[in-house]
Image (cartoon, rainbow, N blue to C red):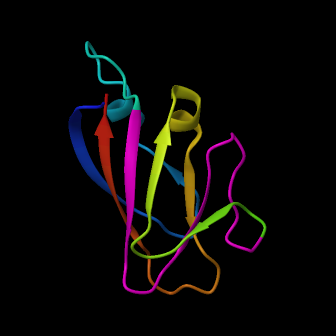
Amino acid sequence: MWDTYSFGTVQVGASAIGLNQNTLRPLGSPPAAAVLIQVQSDTAAIRFRHDGGTPTAASGGGIEAFPGRTILVTGAPDLKNFLAIRRENEVVNPILQITYMR
């Protein structure tokens, strides 16, 4: 099982944003093995990808995650490539609560 070593938040807007690479790979420490991402918002959803492509706000541009959903991302390539964007027609920028584990 994994041990938690860091926690952070990211606000998702109209441009795709990824995970903090310095937190994923801290200098002098082992890199992250996984992250748990909780979508925090009463109404706003995100779209995300972790395959190296860039998500779009429109349908068909990645996987949708609604408020309250927890996303588990594992493996160095998926962690490096994770990107999220606010879903189209949303007016609130959702916050992602991110737990980093190794």
Question: Measured along the vertical axis of the image, is residue 19 above or below residue 46?
Answer: above
At x 38%, y 32%, the residue is 24
In this rendering, would 5 be left or right of 84? left
Residue found farthest to the right: 60
Which residues fall within the magenta stretch? 34-59
| Residue 58, image quadrant | bottom right
Q: Is residue 19 magenta?
A: no
At x 70%, y 60%, the residue is 62
In this rendering, would 86 be left or right of 24? right
Q: Residue 56 location, x and y as percent?
A: 70, 64
Q: Residue 30 location, x and y as percent?
A: 31, 17
Q: How many marks?
A: 0
| Residue 94, image quadrant | bottom left
Q: Residue 26 location, x and y as percent?
A: 30, 24
| Residue 6, image quadrant | top left
Q: Is residue 36 magenta?
A: yes
Quadrant in which the N terminus is drawn: top left
Question: Measured along the vertical axis of the image, is residue 5 above or below residue 49?
Answer: above
